[in-house]
Amino acid sequence: MNSWGEGFDRPLIIAGPCSAETEDQLYETAKALSKSGVKIIRAGVWKPRTRPNSFEGMGLEALKWIRDIKQELNVKFAVEVGNPQHVQEALYHKIDILWIGARSTVNPFTVQEIADSLKGVDIPVLIKNPINPDPSLWIGAIERLYLTGITKIGAIHRGFSTFNKTRFRNPPQWKIPIDLKKTFPDIPLICDPSHIAGDRNMIFEISQKAADLDFDGLMIEVHKDPDSAWSDAKQQVTPAKFEDILQKIKFRDPTSENKEFISHLEELREKIDHLDQELYEVLSERMKLVDQIGFYKRDNNVTVFQKNRWKEISDSREQWAKNLGLNVEFMEELFKMIHQASIRRQEVIMNREEAEEEASNE
Ligand code: PEP
Ligand code: MN
């Protein structure tokens, strides 16, 4: 049992469009989701856009559509609030669940203002992780809401911004939400695979991982026509695809031992991914240098392969392998491949010049 009490369905499923765009888009999406058994619809009404002059949400107009759709379909609605005025308008329009977005969680002033505007109201509030991987900001936001008197709080893991190119839009760092759950064992932990992925093809895989890590729920972006969405088009799925994903996810009941194991494994895998990425980056830098040397050799009429240099290279690399405790034969083989690939690149550079010369002689 968590702090939400008896009424909490596990897994807690929240689905709906990134943004409420038109009454028809919201109604059709919500209707299809409700048919699949979804009881809580999400919809962005005010959109925190990174750059100005993007679509910033339909505001009050959307709240009116929501009020009508709630009645018609008998569903609950969750919306993001970014300031006290949003809170006031959302409460006035009987929104059931509020959430604080990643761009607000980073700012203690904003979180405090939202918390203050909720004094005396007990509405469930979900708090997304801050955009940067600072667990204290997330913890601080939860504490501010608790101190206000909110009793039903949930935490949403939506991944963290990064400058590195990764296959995720906001790479997850599973250890952070799992540690948060240790600090606040009664808080339901929800995963938002849509903002983690940024790509609809990865929603299932991330959702399954969250289920394996014993998350209590999912928030997934669903749009009746994702490709024409006004925000986050690439990561939204159709209601049919959503139903398919949800049916495929196995919500297991892991033992606590199992959970620890998965979480630790995940942590180690994240480190490996990071190191592999660095390895690739180093190789790419190396190839750029190889090309530079290739051009230099070409312009000075020097052969690509030079015996002395190769001897020097293999001796030093063998010594490095020994010093670093690496298998010498394996490293020799690996390095030969790297060296051969480098020579091939330089040969291409040399031959390109010959071809250019021939062409100019014709
Ligand atoms: C959203 O849920 O549409 C949203 C803006 O998410 P986040 O705060 O995680 O970026
Ligand atoms: Mn979105």
Image: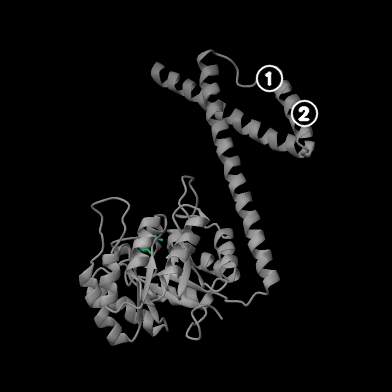
Image quadrant in which the N terminus is located: bottom right
The answer to whether mark 1 is within 8 Å of ligand 1 is no
Disc 1 residue type (three-letter): Arg
Can you give x and y, in whole percent of width and height, for residue 290 in the image?
56, 27
Answer with mark 1 or mark 2, whichever residue precedes in sequence: 1
Q: Which element is circle 1 on?
A: helix
Residue at left 69%, top 70%?
258
Q: Nearer the viewer, residue 51 or 248?
A: 51
Residue at left 38%, top 64%?
100
Determine whether, in the image, residue 267 is placed left or right of residue 68. right
Q: Is residue 114 visible?
A: yes
Q: Nearer the viewer, residue 334 or 273?
A: 273
Q: Which element is circle 2 on?
A: helix
Q: Which residue is mark 1?
A: 309
Residue at left 28%, top 73%?
90
Can you give x and y, in whole percent of width and height, for residue 39 in the image?
40, 82
Q: Which mark is residue 228?
A: none
Question: Which mark's residue is nearer the viewer, 1 or 2?
Answer: 2
Image quadrant in which the C terminus is located: top left
Q: Is residue 362 visible?
A: no
Q: Nearer the viewer, residue 237 or 124?
A: 124
Q: Which residue is mark 2?
A: 319
Colour mapping: one colour
**344 up-or-down from 91: above or below:** above
The answer to whether mark 2 is within 8 Å of ligand 1 is no
Determine whether, in the image, residue 346 is placed left or right of residue 259. left
